[in-house]
Amino acid sequence: MKLQASLLGLAIASALAFAPAQAANGNRADIVNRANALVSAQPAILHSNAGDRFVVRDVVVDRLGTEHVRYDRTWNGLPVLGGDFIMHSRNGQLTGVSQTLQSAARPNLTPRISADQAIVEAGAKFGMRFSGVPTSRMVIYARGATPVLAHDVVYEGIKQDQTPTRMHYIVDANSGKILDRWDDIHTNRTASTGAARPGPGRQGGGTCTSPAAATGTGASLFLGSVTIGTTNCGSFYQMVDRTRGSSAGYNATHDMNNKTGNSMGDVFTDADNAWGSGTLSNRATVAVDAHYGIAMTWDYYKNKHSRNGIDGIGTGAISRVHYGNNYGNAFWSDGCYCMTFGDGDNGATIYPLVSLDVAGHEMSHGVTSRTANLTYSGESGGLNEATSDIFGTMVEFYANNASDPGDYVMGEELFPNNSTMSEAIRWMFKPSLDSKYGSTYSPDCYSGSLGSLDVHYSSGVANHFFYLLAEGAVVPAGFGAGTWANLTPSSLVCNGNTGLVGIGKDKAAAIWYAALTTQFTSSTNYAQARTGTLAAASTLYGAGSAEYNAVNAAWAAVNVNAAPVVQQPLPQRRR
């Protein structure tokens, strides 16, 4: 395979400006050059075709010096969905490839179905009022066994529950069949509930001249009194954290004033740098929770994984609170590079969705989008959701706030009178506990039909794996009696292995983060996630180590027992 050096060089130069600087700047170009040479030398392993072109999206060097270079792929100028891959090499020698593409075949480029026809087909599935004009682009859909020519049709709108949507429909360009679909808006839960409009709070200020970093105090809803990063504008303060972010953008919290859609609302301002009152009558109260939660998430990634913000290069993001009316959900949107939080129903049945674990969950969707970019559909979508649950939980432990101690229950703070945690969004140690919310729920154990579920349900198996890896077959403290009398070690595993021993949450999270950033691709499924986490455990702790064996045992305990080779060994591998 011949690569056009000028085109490849241009693509690489563009990618370098935006990719996370996980490698030292002085070495990055050398790493990319070495990876490019390996790409050119290994067309068969990469299932490459003469029309393929590659763009570097990320570079990571692990503790062993292995270089992981992530590529996106196009063919004859068309994006190849599912064609992304990671080159793994050490000392200039290829050690493996992480990918899901299975074939070098490429489809005929003459569509039988026009873009307009594809838009009509997708519109029938969208089934609601849309905003703007639907778009369609031609792509190669390679998430299945054989790449096919398809239209990527995008409809935007606002769902009945006020959640914005940016739906992708992958329409076969020959048959008109819808092959796949996913939403660019990544929510915390599957449904929302009513919300009452909060009372007025202090707002004010004007143009911020000579801004300077400051530290404010906040009376939060869930966490008591906390300190938050703010900006001194001279005569007033803004809820803009100049210690987390950069001139390209600092972490900031905005009031949506109960509007929906793409509006960014107004940045919170205050006269004396004392924010909120601990009650819902003050609009700044929940802003304190969101602002603090995002700060804790930022610090968790920085101090535990050496990651500088969502994109790895320190760009801050916006948190939007008081979104909509009667809205009981939260979501991440790449389009606004923001986390958005609804008000619930002011605690009648659910509080505003600004708890620590929810904030960590939403910001982690952003981290996933800038690393593996797990497609929000099928098993990869479940792994995307699980990643946010895993790191949202880890943020709660990291913050170590006495008002919200760490646990493996997602969103338990959101529900009033919930000391037994009988209400929650998800229970990681026993995902099927959410069955009381309907006939469709998160299964505890893997089966071949898992990918057909909503991503908030298919995430359960990975959540379950993570809990067992971290803690073992142990009923969590506070459970196992009363409401939870049926929880026993044997009920926590799918294979009867009640002797399963955990390795601790920090090691488990380190393995998941390493897999996310160096092993997972956009279409990684559960079997491949098993292989990826084993590879990460091998790098971090050694092949055959207690940690490596624990990963294998935890996957077996949720019935994920075998995997195709993802990081493919090569004859010339150097050990």
Image (cartoon, helix red, strand yellow):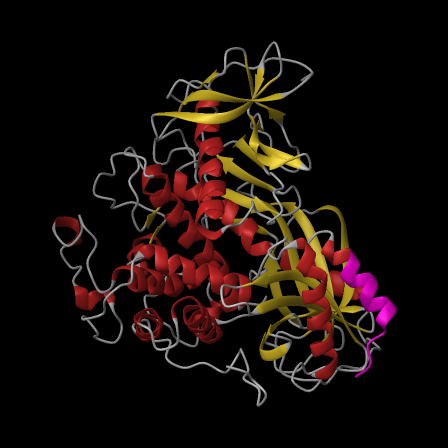
Q: Is residue 192 visible?
A: no
Residue 56, given in percent of the width and then of the height, sits at: 70, 64
| Quarter-of-image position of residue 45 | bottom right
Residue 343, given in percent of the width and then of the height, sits at: 46, 32
Instruction: Tell whether position 7 is magenta.
Output: yes
Q: In percent of the image, x 66 and y 37: which residue is there?
A: 262
Residue 47, given in percent of the width and then of the height, sits at: 68, 83
23 left or right, relative to 161:
right
Majority secondary structure of magenta residues: helix
Q: Quadrant of the N terminus?
A: bottom right
Q: Nearer the viewer, residue 98 or 495?
A: 98
Which region of the structure is painted magenta? 1-13
Rendered position, 291 above or below 498: above
| Quarter-of-image position of residue 348 | top left
Rendered position, 256 above or below 236: below
Residue 355, given in percent of the width and then of the height, sits at: 40, 37
Q: Nearer the viewer, residue 283 or 115?
A: 283
